[in-house]
Image: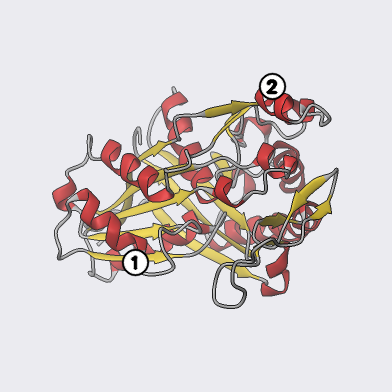
Amino acid sequence: MGATLKHIEYIFPEKGYTNDDLSRQFPDYDFGKFDTKVGIKKRYWAAEDETALDLAEKACEKLFQVFDRKKVDFIIYCTQSPEYILPTTACLLQQRLGLETSVGAFDFNLGCSGYVYGLSMAKGLIETGQAKNVLLVTAETYSKYIHPGDKSNKGIFGDAAAATIIADEEDKSNIRHFLFGTDGLGYDKLIVKNGAAKNKMESGPETRQYGSGNSYTDNDLYMDGPEIFNFTSAVIPKFTVNLLEKNNLAMEDCSLFVFHQANQFMLDFLRKKVKAPKEKFYIDLEDGGNTVSCTIPIALKRWSEEYTGEFPVKNISLVGFGVGLSWGGTVIHIDGKL
């Protein structure tokens, strides 16, 4: 049994917002840095009546244009934008997609490391004989958690969904070894405090300020950007070296590095810290922004569409990191266009 990453498709909401659009909304805020320092020119936000599940369904239907839905026997759904507290959104997705009732389905709540974790679980299901074709879905609508006056997070985060097929190809596998990390002490550095079991949603919550005049309440998404950067810069370079060592690789053995697409400044910093050549370090932020658990599959799909060289491409390092605090990595090969 061998777990093979076969296909990826993704979808954005219909409505996109450029930096000029945001500048008109917030004339007192300079969005020029998003073109250069942050590297984002456009992000997409779900409509008021559109959810992450709606986006997930569209991404899966796009995927089923190239893969037979009848072959799917397990759904893994990564989201921090669930349809309900319960039931699990993966069950709703099974029904919407018209998949057999014999499929397994579950959600897991992870953000920017979620795609790597999902690949690990899919590989485990296949290589232990529990599934043949796993549908891994990542879907997020962070825009629904952002305070209307939080200019920074509005500029950074976009909504999206991505659907990936990981299939059993006998003794062939293009997904190698994994490495993970967790530091729950940083749980409050990227958080929505209210709305679950500990703290109910507040009516008329206190509005607070942070950063350059950004507003939020405990009902909204809060991100301590400097602390997230400090965590990333301290942990991820060494983690990347350890990931390569676990896969018996040197830096020069890697064909491509695809990290979570947080922001260009952070990615440039990490690239220099790990001493990766610029031409091997893929950055894909301009159109879409930071889509949380969707950034890595979107980047992989776009790279595959742009790639003009020969397949297979070996030793592509994937590293996700963020909310939790959580991080994870693996190395894959790609045998053809995704």
Mark 2: which secondary structure?
Answer: helix
Q: Quadrant of residue 157?
A: top right
Q: For this rendering, which residue is in front, 226 or 55? A: 55
Rendered location of residue 45, percent (x, y)? 53, 37
Answer few, some or many: residues within 10 Å of disc 1's Cα (few below 14, many 20 plus, some between 14 and 19).
some
Note whether 301 is above or below 88 in the view shown.
above
Note whether 129 is above or below 280 in the view shown.
below
Rendered location of residue 274, percent (x, y)? 72, 48
Judging by the rendered image, the residue that carries numbered circle 1 is 106
Answer few, some or many: residues within 10 Å of disc 2's Cα (few below 14, many 20 plus, some between 14 and 19).
some
Q: Disc 2 residue type?
A: Asp
Note whether 308 is above or below 255 in the view shown.
above
Label placed on residue 20 = 2
Rendered location of residue 332, percent (x, y)? 44, 49
Q: Quadrant of the N terminus?
A: bottom left
Q: How is the image coloured?
A: secondary structure
Residue positioned 41% across, 44% down in the render:
162
Q: Is residue 218 left or right of residue 167?
A: right
Q: For this rendering, which residue is in front, 20 or 138? A: 20
Q: CA distance from mark 1 to mark 2?
A: 40 Å
